[in-house]
Amino acid sequence: MWNVTRLVFHRRLLGVQWTLVLLCATFSQSGSSGISSSLCPGGVLPSKFHGGVDHCVCQKNTQCRGSACSIGHSSNGNGYGNKVHGYAADCSDCTCVKFAPMKNFKDIRREKFLWIIGSHHKTGSFLMERVWGHLRREAEPPLNVKVKSFKPVSRIQWTKIGASDTDVVISFHADNVGPTLNESLGSRRYRFVHLVRDPVEQIVSAVQYELQRLSAINGTSVHDSYLKVVRNVKNDPSEACFAMANFMRPEQERMAAQFEVSAADHNALNVHFEDFKDDYGATFNRIFTFLGIPRKKMENFLELAKKEDLSTKSAQWLNNSRHVTAGKHETQRAELMTLLLSNQQFGVPLRKLRTRLGYTLF
């Protein structure tokens, strides 16, 4: 059975984390597939995928064509580095064909691909917006990027997008993105990258960000809902943290629900926000490989994405950026995280959310 378990440890243990993930993947490959080979045509390896779904894995130098392909997914067995293809065993129009990589964006547009980048509050929304602002000009004509900042994309809007020439959708509030989306997109084929974050860090980051904004506007009328949460408790970070945790609970539940939908979707990839700090370049390489960026453009895409790598930014830039809270008030951040986890009202639900989102913290 192919079964890769993600163990995310505290950052002090990152070296151990990646060793354990590798061992888990290797051990899984030695097990039995657990499904009947009759589900997959000759020469296609039967396997388990996305939480036990019957799955077929393409042989080396072949790629999937069809409506339920999973391209380069780690659960295909060999990870993104080898770009292994596979598909759901019950897919009626899926097959493995001789490998013929898309050479340019004309090929991608001819296949009617729609790239969807979905995030949530403080999970990398502005990072994605800025990165794709750089990337869009790598295509000719430039990629048509649509940003939805304030609300999830509605079904009516998805239908309009499906009928348009939009290449990339960036949604700051990803919700209900899954196989049912095909009904709205018509002939378009989507690839969805979903960004999530440790919910405890997400809350604390939101509090620090909004307190920073309140200080900047200096008494100006407040209309933003997140700002309103901390406005009346701005002098007490602990109370602001509890208020934000209560306010963000529905949103975090939607994030976890979307994570679970994406985990079962062959056209989706869940990405943990913390991965960008662990290895920024490798994380974007994984994203771009999944999306199917043409080989000739991959190096350029990675170089352009590096422009937003925080490790390359000056101390002055980081200090002036209101969207960046990492590295600021680290003592306060640690104290607020401990406070949340030890609180009777929030501690247990937040630990459950962590588990649902694929985090195992020690």
Image: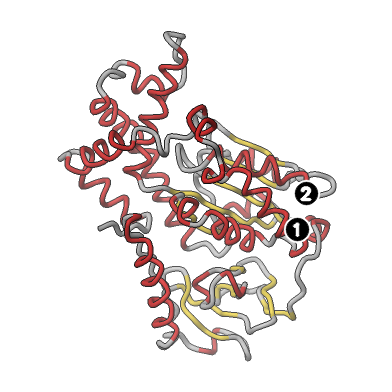
- What is the x, y in percent for residue 162? 70, 47
Residue ID at (61%, 75%): 82
Image vertical order of residue 96 relative to residue 10, above or below: below
* Amino acid, disc 2: Glu
Which labelled disc corresponds to residue 279? none
Residue hosting label 1: 297
Residue at the extreme left of the image, as rendered: 344
Query: Which residue appears farthest toward the front when viewing the image?
Result: 315
Label 2 secondary element: helix
Looking at the figure, which quarter contains the N terminus?
Answer: bottom left
Q: Position of residue 351 (x, y in %)?
A: 26, 50
Secondary structure beneath dot 1 equals helix
Q: Where residue 322 appears, x then y in whole percent?
A: 49, 28
| Residue 342 placement, left or right of 152 | left
Say which label, 2 or 1, has the lower sequence index: 2
Q: Residue 295: name its quadrant.
A: bottom right
Residue at image mark 2: 138
Q: Residue at x 59, y 47 (%)?
A: 117
Mark 2 and mark 1 in contact? Answer it, CB < 8 Å: yes
Q: Is residue 296 visible?
A: yes
Looking at the image, which residue is at 41% across and 81% down?
28
Task: Tell me the kind of residue under disc 1.
Answer: Lys
In the image: residue 107, left or right of residue 234: right
Q: Is residue 320 left or right of residue 168?
A: left
Judge whether 301 appears above or below 173 on screen: below
